[in-house]
Amino acid sequence: MTRRPELTAVTPVLKNKAVWLAAVTAFLIEMAFSARYGYVRDELYFLAAGAHPAAGYVDQPSLTPLLAHLDALVTGNTLVGLRALPALGLAALVLLAAAMARALGAGSRGQLLAAIAAGGTGEYLGAMHELTTTVPDFVAWAVALYLVTRLLTSRDPRWWPAIGGAAGIGMSAKWNIGFLVAGLVLGFAGTPQARPLLRTWYLVAGAAVFAALAAPDFLWQAAHGWPNLAVFRVLQGDAWQNRAQYWPLQVVYTSILLVPLWVRGIRWALRHPVLRVVGIAAVFVLVTQFILGGKAYYPGGIYTFCFAAGAVSLEGLPWRRRALTGIAAGVISSLIALPVLPAATLARVPVQKVNYDLGEEIGWPTEVAALAAAWRALPPAERERATLLAGNYGEAGAVDRYGASFGLPQVYSGANSFWFWGPPPAADTVVVAVDVDPALLHREFAHVTQVALYHNELNVADDEQGAVIDVATGLRSSWAAAWPAFKHFS
């Protein structure tokens, strides 16, 4: 008779006060710096996308915009409120790493070591600072890995539907978890002791749940001509640069102090007769993302298991020094992963070489203010038939978020899903444009005049520094005819 899965097995972890303290500390650290700078461009985009509910979007599935929209409704559309959700995600990673360590056989000290490692790794500190697709992606990986661990250690196939649900939710946030699913398939194929767990209708049920949760985005993509493929092609333009940086950044992102722990964890799992499944999956994910030229953070979700397995492999050995090493890793990593330094220092300290997003959190309100100044400078007759046009989705999202406070109208953009929410009204034949290709404006309008050049007040290098603000008049055709030329998926 098949033994019932121990669904309450996580309870001892939740009673481990030290693990809870680590999770709460991780949450509070994130919240302490949650509003030190400002929104990152993806957050502004997701807030705008959430106001346009859909089964999918050009560059990601529907879950993250939905979370951003619901969070804004609940918290009053504040930056601190938005950042509370990813901060909770970091706390979840800490608890799940500890839960995995316990399921793998670690005692209370091993659980705490796994928790500290998850909370102290720079990749998680940085990723869980902003509400992007990486937040639900990493959490879904951790939940799926915990459930797979329970499946393998209990040898009870009734975990399969839950595994399918976790992976399916991950797919509704980002297709990245598909690499974990493929790695697990390879792991089962290479682990004879685990193959009997595949001969069950519970696996079929799990696959059905996975497919049902992943289907809406695939159907949306198919109905709209697979725009995500255009985005992937653009991302592949950075493939060789990504490969050159990939392995060094695995060390930097997880912290060089924690590399021995996760390497030891993979090695321990590969030597285990059953948990070899996840060890193979970990190697597959890391190597495949390198071969494909993926960004260095793409495989980051695998490290919760690697930390847990590494903690188990150290069970019985002196642990205080290793725990202090994890804490030290967190302190060092936070200087790069979080906006700890004053924003002005980014112009002098090369923190953005590792975490470029810090600079991308600076200057959005001032850029919208510069656009508003150009808008107000229009003659009243032109302003009545003018529209706003942004070159990228961050700028469009910033106007969408801050524009009303400056008296600005709705913004339009050809960038990603914003293109589907256009074109501008037919009567608007004048454009105030920020960071739009001048050649495109000259082609579509009779007159184009540069009226401003945006610079943030801190001289911090980011994608907005030096953005051109133009006024274009005399639309040569109709917006219906011109709008396809503005489409830009990246």
Image: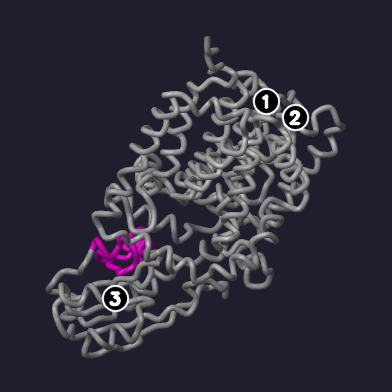
Q: Residue at x 50, y 73 (%)?
A: 456
Residue at image coords 20%, 68%: 423
From mark 2 to mark 1, how far is it between C-alphas? 8 Å
The answer to which image quadrant residue 443 occupies is bottom left
Q: Which residues are magenta?
A: 395-421
Pointer 1: what residue?
Answer: 102
Query: Does the rendering let one see residue 405?
Result: no
The percent coordinates of residue 250 (x first, y second) are: 67, 55
Left or right relative to 225: residue 340: right
Q: Amino acid at mark 3?
A: Trp
Q: Is residue 321 magenta?
A: no
Picture coordinates of residue 26, whole percent (x, y): 63, 40
Q: Does label 2 or label 1 sit earlier along the sequence?
A: 1
Q: Is residue 329 among the parts visible in the rendering?
A: yes
Under circle 3, the secondary element is helix
Q: Was residue 399 drawn as part of the magenta stretch in this picture? A: yes
Residue furthest out toward the right = 318
Task: List the residue tagged with mark 3.
Answer: 375
Q: Residues within 10 Å of mark 3 (few under 14, many from 20)?
A: many
Q: Secondary structure at mark 2?
A: helix
Residue that carries the numbered disc 2 in the rendered image: 110
State the SS at label 1: helix
Q: Amino acid at mark 2?
A: Gly
In the picture, the disc for residue 348 is none
Q: Is residue 118 above or below residue 364?
A: above
Q: Main secondary structure of the magenta part?
A: helix
**Crowdedness near tag 2: few (<14), some (14–19) or many (≥20) residues, C-alpha within 10 Å:** many
Q: Cβ–Cβ below 8 Å for labels 2 and 1?
A: yes
Q: Position of residue 468 (x, y in %)?
A: 40, 81
Mark 2 and mark 3: Cα distance apart in space: 60 Å
- Between 139 and 201, the residue placed more toward the observer is 201
